[in-house]
Image: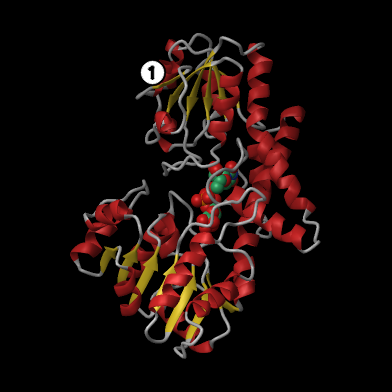
């Protein structure tokens, strides 16, 4: 089938590649000429494992191409996915201006029956608005169209795996014809398909992300209690993971969640609940706990080192999670900003992120190696669980440090081994 993907950001590009992988003919549309040129040349404008080779494969097989030509792209395709950004507004609500612009353009150029699908994370009622925006552009038009919600659940760093092997596919709409069409796109995928109305589909996405955020804040609070009681949070998490009602995932205590999704989506759900006079107090706490989490590490640093002024701290990891160069709402940055405000000298290492692209300070030095970032430091903080940090020769690292304090903000290192290696090791709740 012919599918148009509007917006070639992270979600749009991944969706385009997955549909091409499923054998569909896909066009990616974006206003940004530089992105389109890069993609047509087989290069991604963001870091995500596995996507690069898929991009080259489908360009070569002519299953995929990218364009800036809105009119042609819309006229030639009858299934149109909206994958543009929905950034957070100052009141926490999702900003729908990009979605509206795209809907207007679709309205302007629609020439025959189209199914318009929202893939972007959008608040309840957006599909209805999209319908209105498309219709408004040409109220006289008798050409029918349907709007369907088909939210995505992929994680950055695991995008390909998640998109090719989803736990479920959610399709929300009121037209059986449109739902059947969208369902048929996924016929080669072995995943349960949940069909509902568009409002429920939209709420499913927010509820899923908020629930996962809640699991993280919950385990982070229990981790603090573990610190007080001298119990390992890993033992506790292990003990509850095996309960199938709780499940094994999203129970890793650490510096808190970041990224472009959880903070934004929890805020948006809270905003919707307030507007509807429903008190989602549990989610308010989720946010409070998460925002405090990087400062819990600072508190641990201060307890060990006393005043932090003039100290040198090495920070390992800048991305909000491994496998991505995304630093949006990364807890590492909250930590670094606070250290800088306390006149700490900071050395950083990240396998893909360059701090100078995001923060300008003479107090920060970026190092290419972990040993470089550790040199002469009073303490190291591990803030992103990059796999390569597991393979480090820590004895070598210890030799160059002033004092062998290590604060594992992701609980990824083997605490006993680090202690045996002579480190003064602290995790979150272990
Ligand atoms: C999240 C959801 O997991 C996806 O299902 C969803 O599609 C996506 O948002 C979205 O809405 O687009 P993502 O933000 O890419 O995906 O990353 P996650 O793997 O969910 O991690 C989010 C944050 O939680 C990271 O900072 C991670 O370090 C943290 N985390 C995760 C923990 O602190 N503990 C855990 O046990 C798991």
Using the rendered image of the protein, determine whether residue 315 is visible from the camera's viewpoint.
yes
> Hey, which quadrant is residue 105 in on the image?
bottom left
Using the rendered image of the protein, determine whether residue 193 is visible from the camera's viewpoint.
no
Residue farthest along the bottom direction in this orientation: 142
At 63% from the left and 71% from the top, the residue drawn is 125
Q: Is mark 1 within 8 Å of ligand 1?
A: no
Q: Measured from the top left, where is residue 381 in percent x and y?
A: 54, 25
292 relative to 128 in the view: left or right: right
Q: Mark 1 — residue?
A: 372
Q: Measured from the top left, where is residue 315 in percent x and y?
A: 49, 25
At 28% from the left and 64% from the top, the residue drawn is 67
Q: Measured from the top left, where is residue 340 in percent x and y?
A: 56, 20
Residue 396, placed above or below residue 53:
above
Q: Quick one: quadrant of the C terminus?
A: top right
Residue 192, placed above or below residue 274:
below
Between 384 and 227, which is closer to the camera in this rendering? 384
46 relative to 148 in the view: left or right: left
Between 45 and 165, which is closer to the camera in this rendering? 45
Residue farthest along the left direction in this orientation: 60
323 relative to 139 in the view: left or right: left
At 25% from the left and 54% from the top, the residue drawn is 37
């Amino acid at each position: 089938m012919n599918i148009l993907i509007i917006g070639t950001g992270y979600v749009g590009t991944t969706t385009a590649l997955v549909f091409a992988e499923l054998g569909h003919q896909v066009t990616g549309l974006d206003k940004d000429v530089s992105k389109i040129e890069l993609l047509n040349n087989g290069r991604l404008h963001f870091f995500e494992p596995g996507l690069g080779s898929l991009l080259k494969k489908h360009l070569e097989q002519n299953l995929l191409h990218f364009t800036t030509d809105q009119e042609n792209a819309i006229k030639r395709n009858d299934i149109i996915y909206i994958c543009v950004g929905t950034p957070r507004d100052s009141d926490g609500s999702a900003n729908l201006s990009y979605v509206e612009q795209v809907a207007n353009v679709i309205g302007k150029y629609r020439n025959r029956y189209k199914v318009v699908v929202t893939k972007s994370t959008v608040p309840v009622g957006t599909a209805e608005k999209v319908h209105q925006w498309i219709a408004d552009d040409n109220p006289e038009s008798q050409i029918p169209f349907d709007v369907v919600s088909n939210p995505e659940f992929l994680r950055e760093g695991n995008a390909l795996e998640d998109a090719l092997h989803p736990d479920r596919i959610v399709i929300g709409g009121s037209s059986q014809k449109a739902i059947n069409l969208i369902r048929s796109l996924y016929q080669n995928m072995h995943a349960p398909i949940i069909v509902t109305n568009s409002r429920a589909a939209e709420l499913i996405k927010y509820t899923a992300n908020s629930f996962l955020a809640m699991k993280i804040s919950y385990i982070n609070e229990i981790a603090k209690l573990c610190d007080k009681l001298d119990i390992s949070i890993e033992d506790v998490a292990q003990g509850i993971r095996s309960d199938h009602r709780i499940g094994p995932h999203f129970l890793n205590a650490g510096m808190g969640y970041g990224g472009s999704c959880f903070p934004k989506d929890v805020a948006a759900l809270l905003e919707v609940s307030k507007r509807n006079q429903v008190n989602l107090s549990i989610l308010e706490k989720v946010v409070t706990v998460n925002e405090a989490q990087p400062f819990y590490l600072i508190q641990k640093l201060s307890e060990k080192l006393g005043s932090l002024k003039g100290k040198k701290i090495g920070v390992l990891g800048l991305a909000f999670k491994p496998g991505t160069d995304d630093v949006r709402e990364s807890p590492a940055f909250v930590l670094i900003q606070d250290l800088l405000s306390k006149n700490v000298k900071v050395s950083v290492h990240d396998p893909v992120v360059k701090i100078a692209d995001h923060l300008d300070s003479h107090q920060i030095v970026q190092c290419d190696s972990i040993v470089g970032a550790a040199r002469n430091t009073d303490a190291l903080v591990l803030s992103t669980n990059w796999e390569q940090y597991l393979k480090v020769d820590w004895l070598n690292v210890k030799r160059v440090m002033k004092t062998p304090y290590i604060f594992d903000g992701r609980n990824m290192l083997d605490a006993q081994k680090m202690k045996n290696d002579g480190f003064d090791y602290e995790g979150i709740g272990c």
